[in-house]
Image (cartoon, rainbow, N blue to C red):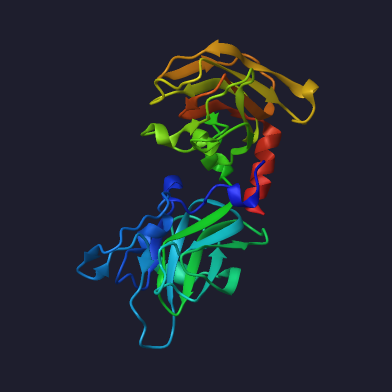
Amino acid sequence: MTTPSTLPDLASRALSGGVVHANDEFFAPSDYLVDPNPPTFTPHTFGAKGQVYEGWETRRRRTPGHDHAIVRLGVPGIVHTVVVDTSYFTGNYPPFAAVDGCRLDGHPSPGELAEATWTPLVPRAALAGDTRNVFPVDPGHRITHVRLSIFPDGGVARLRVHGEVTADPRFLTGGLVDLAALEHGGLVVDCSNMFYGTPTNLIAPGRARTMGEGWETARRRDDGNDWVLVRLAAPGVVRVAELDTSHFKGNAPGAAALRGCATDPDDPQDWFDLLPVTRLQPDTRHRFPVTDGRPVRWVRLDAYPDGGMARLRLLGEITPAGLDTLYQRWFT
C-alpha cells in the first residue's frame, strides 16, 4: 500500500521539477538535486574543480551565513516527506539542513521567490553523510516551491519531496483528460509485484524511452496474475483506455483487463468491468474504447499472467462533483 515515502517525488525532473536559483554551485551544479535517477560515484575522477560528484556542492565558506537552493516543484502538492540525500558526500556534506515551502502560483522569478512568504517544512536538523536523511512533514497547504538551506556549506546529492499532487482543475475541463495521470493527481495505491520496475511509472508523464521506465514484475510460477490498483485524480467516466507495452518484447503480458470501482474498493460487489480480458501484443501501444458510462474512482489493471507494461492511460471526463472537490482543494 502507498505510504508517505512511496508518494511521488514532486520535485523530480521527471515531473518537470527544476532548480530556479542557487546562491553557490562552485564544485557541482544544483540541477542534480532533482535528477530522478539514483546518484552514482566514481572514485578518483577529477575535473578542473576537483573530484566529480553527482550532486550540488558549494565552496567552503570563509564568511558567516549559509547556502541555499530553490526548487520549483514539477507539480504543486501537499508535502508528506522530505529526503535530503547526501550519498557519496562523506567529508564534505553539510552538518545541518532545513527545508521551507511556499505557494506562489504562476511562473515566479527568483527575485519574486526571494520575497515570498516561506513556511518551515523541516526545521534545521542534523544530517549524516553518505545517507538518505528522511524527514516526515506534517501535511499542510499546497506547496509550489521548496527552499533547501544547508549550514554552512557542502554537498547534497538529491532532494526528494514526496507528497500528494494537487492539480489545477482549470486545466482538467473541456474534453478528455487522463484521469490516471500522476501529474493530474492519479496515484498507484497498491500492486502485486514490482520486482523490476515501480508501477508508478505506468502513470508518469510522456512516453517511456526504455523498458526501464515501465513497470515489470518477476516471472510467476503459480496460477495467479499480477495487478496494479490506481486511484484516479478524481471520480470520472473513462472513455478510452491505453495499455502501452512499448519496449517490452519478450516479456509483455499475454493479456490484460480493467475493472472499475466507484465508492468502496474493499467491497467486491462495487467492482465492474471496464475492459474484459483482452489479448495484448508485445512492444505495442494499444487503445481501446470503454463503453460503460458509469463513474469510477479506482481502476485495477490485471496483467495475465505477468510481465511488463510501459504506460497506462485512462482518458475520460471528471464528474461535476469531482470537479467541485478539485476546485475547493485548489482555491482554499
Residue placed most toward the observer, 203 or 87: 87
| Quarter containing the N terminus | top right
Instruction: Confirm whether residue 164 shows in the render.
Output: no
Residue 38 drawn at (x, y percent): 42, 51
Residue that extends furthest to the bottom in the rendered view of this protein: 63
Against 33, residue 195 (above or below) is above
Measuring 67% from the left and 58% from the top, which residue is drawn there?
A: 139
Residue 104 drawn at (x, y percent): 52, 60
Measuring 64% from the left and 45% from the top, which residue is drawn there?
A: 327
Measuring 45% from the left and 74% from the top, which residue is drawn there?
A: 94
Residue placed most toward the observer, 190 or 314: 190
Residue placed most toward the observer, 143 or 277: 277
Residue 153 drawn at (x, y percent): 41, 77
| Quarter containing the C terminus | bottom right
Q: Is residue 48 left or right of residue 282?
A: left
Measuring 54% from the left and 20% from the top, which residue is drawn there?
A: 240
Residue 67 drawn at (x, y percent): 42, 76
Against 34, residue 267 (above or below) is above
Q: Is residue 150 left or right of residue 292?
A: left
Q: Quadrant of residue 86?
A: bottom left
Count how many numbered circles sit on residues in the image: 0
